[in-house]
Image (cartoon, helix red, strand yellow):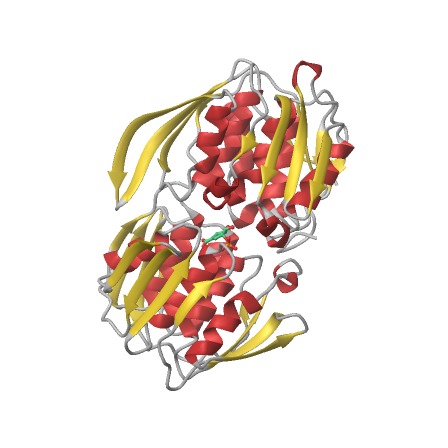
Amino acid sequence: MSSHGDPIPMTSSACGPLSGVADVPGDKSISHRSLILGAMCVGETTIAGLLEGQDVLDTGAAMRAFGAEVTDQGGGNWSVRGVGVGGFAEPDQVIDCGNSGTGVRLIMGAMATSPISATFTGDASLNGRPMARVTDPLALFGCQAVGRAGGRLPMTLVGAAEPVPVRYVVPVPSAQVKSAVLLAGLNAPGQTVVIEAEATRDHTERMLAGFGAEISVVETDSGREITLTGQPELRAQHIEVPRDPSSAAFPVCAALIVPGSDVLVPGIGLNPTRAGLFTTLREMGADLTFENERVEGGEPVADLRARYSPDLKGIEVPPDRAASMIDEYPVLSVVAAFADGDTVMRGVKELRVKESDRIEAMASGLRANGVEVEDGPDWWIVTGRGQRGVPGGAVCASHLDHRIAMSFLILGMRSETPVKVDDGGPIATSFPIFEPLMQRLGAKVMRDQV
Ligand code: S3P
């Protein structure tokens, strides 16, 4: 099942060189945060380049349910008239966050310190994902949560009427957990402190500072310590959303494995907490260059140029790089299948609790297509086939996971026999123009006639 409708089976076949310019959509993480923070200030925030994927649209609808005015101005431009910190109204309907863990976890944080209740649900993927990692720290503020067994959605949160600030050491490397705590801290008096042992994406910290909150970050022996002073008056902003490096990963990786390719992906956000894949690909021998490096809207940005790289070799990916490329392991495993030797990925337990168990989903699909994969609780190893090529020919399950669907479609672009996915519908959550964009570059990726 796709997240919103009937399954959309898709097939991808070997193609000639990929070439041209790939204009990928806006960053998903920054898009969610733009809508949520816009809803938490007084005045009108304007957003250019918002990702109009289903995940972000669901967050926009949720912000309306909490009382903000969210308007599509056309052409990727949106505006949000916020209600101010602590100004959320109680929604009169269940909040459906669809497929989005980021959406639901950040929104839970944003409402946890207001005296209102809200009930959250999602699709089958989201309703299977752990929420205690967020509701545990929110309980410290005084917020109560009741959900299904194992801390699963659907779940009702009763926000704290008299919130207290917290000091919280994030037990798993998760920007969603960190962000939920910071957003809750906005409406608690005094200082909320969050400590993360491993640096995760820092868009929330950067954007809170941009919106006028008092926030500081210091590196300590126990990690990054973030201190936020509660109850600020956030100032409405204009936000230019950089293009998503996690979406850029797909045309970039396709260009590296399809002979003769040369693809330019302009305006990609290259925040160091997000750019681990590109470092890894270069270590594997990828012909990948950053052109026109610049800073836009407080985020480093560059144009990426990826060319066919015939001599890719397997490497050991340093575990301390995992957080900066956590969403890119599925497509990295596809590149690894075409490299020479083993690509070893350790310290990646978090992959098992994403939109799907991404190690299991990729390992079983790669094996079905003739690639050897070994895996354990927090590691996996892909044995690259190098010059022998990848047989392909299998139908892969996407498990309601956009990145699994797109990764297998990239695999098919260089496999000997076409690769199918049972449902490409979830691709619309993060990269709604994936299919026409890849086709314009020369890929043979299409929906099956059903
Ligand atoms: C995200 C954080 C990551 C990432 C997700 C987006 C965010 O999740 O996988 O796609 O925007 O904060 P975790 O916080 O679970 O690592």
**275 up-or-down from 12: above or below:** below
Q: Looking at this view, name the residue that lies furthest to the bottom.
A: 161
Placement of 2 over or under 334, stated as above or below: below
Q: Is residue 298 left or right of residue 7?
A: left
Locate the C terminus by quadrant: top right
Decide: is 51 above or below 181.
Answer: above
Figure disc tally: 0
Q: Quadrant of residue 306?
A: top left
Q: Is residue 336 visible?
A: yes
Which residue is nearer to you in this view: 311 or 6?
311
Would residue 9 be seen by someone viewing this image from the given angle? no
Side of 74 relative to 321 (left or right): left
Residue at the image position 37 percent from the left and 67 percent from the top:
183
The residue depicted at 45 percent of the width and 67 percent of the height is 107
Between residue 267 and residue 174, name the one nearer to us.
Answer: 174
Name the one closer to the observer, 418 or 214: 214
Residue at figure coordinates x 68%, y 27% from the top left: 383
Residue 347, how many percent across, how many down?
A: 57, 45
Residue at x-position 33% and y-position 63%: 37
Image coordinates of residue 74 in percent, x first then y, are 36, 50
- Residue 392 figure quarter: top right
Residue 404 rendering spot, x and y as whole percentages: 63, 42
Q: Residue 139: give x, y in percent of width and height.
A: 48, 77
Please state which of residues 42 and 186 is positioned toward the viewer in this rendering: 186
- Residue 38: which quarter of the image? bottom left
